[in-house]
């Protein structure tokens, strides 16, 4: 069903990276360090303040159920309740400091113990020395993986099923009745054109509340929209289909989406938006007692551009781990900065385990790695193979804005093939534990 990982021989460069802040207790992002070095101490900057996530992770693990039988619904409720009630060491005093000094109302996050606040440079210096503060990063722009190709495609084709789906052996699973029915996919992208004929009938908002089906800080009261067409394209690869035109992996699955990048406004708060989007995805309807609204998989078509954070930055690791603790598979596009080694974007470059973070590279129909596809090894651990898997990502025909279709190339086009595959596996076994599910992507065992 899935492509065999393509091994590329590269020169492994080992770089020892030590996060040292000479004057401060907390680790600071490079852009924030530069502002502190160059700016007037009275200048104001928006920051995300991250507390001790290790203590939170330990708390979550200690309270994990001992039952050998996995119940996804019960697990989601357990994780939600523990995350929303958790208090990090020194959290009260840190929150008091932020409330006193932030020039805007602070945002309190619970997916990890963190805050978004607007502070003077001089106040950041004081904050960095407070006990319990782990990381302080500027609330920087995080952009989507811009496709390497974007050209109009015909509204219809001469083949009913795309060559890419045949390459992945997806039609064989369709013939077994596995087309994603009962599964729910989510994208963190530029949004989705909710009225597109290949996607409209599959939107969960057709029978569920808007707020539980669409996340947008720009226009939360509108139906899903897409300013660029990128998110509509990636969603099409996951679930898109027309009567005589099947191009999505899981055409019977439903979708929800968070428009978190390039939504037609200043992007200075995108980092904070994405943290909020992960919180939303873990509890879209705001009710901790319901779980059918929680997606099976989140497709991430965004990354942190090089230079904004330190290599192997762990800002999002706690967020990813906590979402996956609830059983939501997170899939990341590897990036389009290849073919040089060590070009993976963060957090796709994480390599603490062969299953975290699960990143996807791009190949063509001949199973050759695309030149643009970002390569490993990871700066976190050069012994780990990254990206973990590959999928078709060259000249991919899918839906785009305006009700049309486009050919696009990029790892953002490859990653939704794997996210769609997760939807098929979830239909086959709704209670499959997350790590076992990911292992099926390495070693397909569906018969």
Image: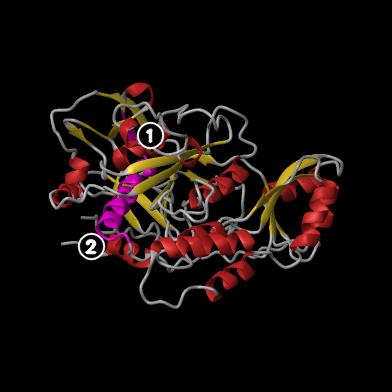
Total residue callouts: 2
Q: Position of residue 297 (x, y in %)?
A: 39, 52
Q: Nearer the viewer, residue 154 or 55?
A: 55
State the residue lying farthest toward the front.
Answer: 289
Give the residue displayed 81% in from the left and 61% down from the top. Answer: 93
Residue 361 higher or lower than 86, as above or below = above
* Residue 206: image tag: 1
Q: Secondary structure at mark 1?
A: helix
Give how far across and how far down residue 309 sits, in percent. 61, 51
* Relative to 305, residue 350 above or below: below
Q: Residues within 10 Å of mark 2 (few under 14, many from 20)?
A: some
Q: CA distance from mark 1 to mark 2?
A: 33 Å
Q: Which residue sits at x=58%, y=64%? A: 82
Q: Position of residue 415 (x, y in %)?
A: 36, 47
Q: First in sequence: mark 1 or mark 2?
A: 1
- Can the viewer see residue 308? yes
The one nearer the camera, 83 or 366, is 83
Up/down of 190 relative to 423, above or below: above
**Which circle, 1 or 2, is nearer the viewer?**
1
């Amino acid at each position: 069903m899935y492509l065999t990982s393509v091994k590329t021989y590269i020169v492994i460069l080992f770089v020892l990276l030590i996060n040292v802040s000479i004057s401060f207790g907390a680790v600071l992002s490079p852009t924030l360090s530069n502002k502190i070095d160059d700016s007037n101490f009275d200048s104001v900057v928006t920051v995300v303040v991250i507390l001790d996530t290790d203590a939170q992770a330990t708390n979550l693990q200690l309270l994990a159920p001992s039952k050998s039988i996995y119940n996804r619904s019960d697990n989601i409720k357990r994780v939600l309740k523990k995350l929303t009630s958790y208090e990090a060491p020194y959290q009260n005093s840190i929150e008091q400091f932020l409330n006193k000094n932030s020039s805007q109302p602070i945002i309190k996050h619970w997916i990890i113990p963190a805050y978004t606040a607007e502070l003077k440079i001089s106040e950041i210096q004081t904050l960095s020395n407070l006990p319990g503060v782990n990381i302080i990063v500027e609330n920087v722009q995080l952009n989507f993986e811009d496709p390497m190709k974007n050209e109009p495609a015909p509204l219809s084709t001469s083949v009913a099923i795309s060559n890419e789906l045949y390459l992945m052996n997806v039609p064989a699973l369709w013939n077994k009745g596995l087309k994603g029915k009962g599964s729910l996919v989510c994208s963190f992208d530029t949004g989705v054109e909710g009225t597109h004929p290949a996607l409209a009938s599959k939107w969960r908002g057709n029978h569920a509340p808007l707020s539980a089906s669409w996340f947008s800080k720009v226009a939360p009261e509108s139906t899903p929209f897409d300013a660029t067409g990128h998110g509509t394209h990636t969603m099409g690869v996951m679930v898109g289909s027309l009567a005589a035109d099947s191009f999505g992996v899981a055409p019977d699955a439903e979708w929800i989406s968070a428009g978190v990048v390039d939504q037609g406004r200043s992007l200075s708060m995108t980092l904070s938006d994405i943290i909020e989007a992960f919180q939303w995805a873990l509890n879209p309807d705001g009710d901790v007692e319901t779980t059918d609204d929680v997606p099976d998989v989140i497709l991430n078509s965004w990354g942190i551009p090089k230079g904004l954070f330190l290599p192997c930055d762990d800002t999002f690791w706690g967020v990813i781990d906590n979402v996956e603790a609830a059983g939501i598979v997170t899939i990341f596009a590897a990036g389009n900065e290849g073919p040089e080694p060590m070009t993976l974007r963060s957090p796709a470059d994480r390599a603490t385990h062969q299953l975290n973070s699960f990143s996807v590279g791009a190949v063509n129909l001949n199973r050759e790695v695309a030149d643009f596809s970002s390569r490993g090894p990871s700066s976190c651990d050069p012994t780990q193979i990254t990206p973990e898997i590959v999928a078709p990502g060259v000249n991919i025909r899918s839906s785009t804005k305006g009700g049309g279709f486009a050919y696009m190339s990029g790892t953002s086009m490859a990653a939704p093939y794997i996210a769609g595959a997760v939807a098929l596996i979830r239909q086959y076994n709704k209670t499959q534990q997350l790590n076992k599910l990911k292992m099926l992507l390495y070693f397909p065992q569906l018969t």
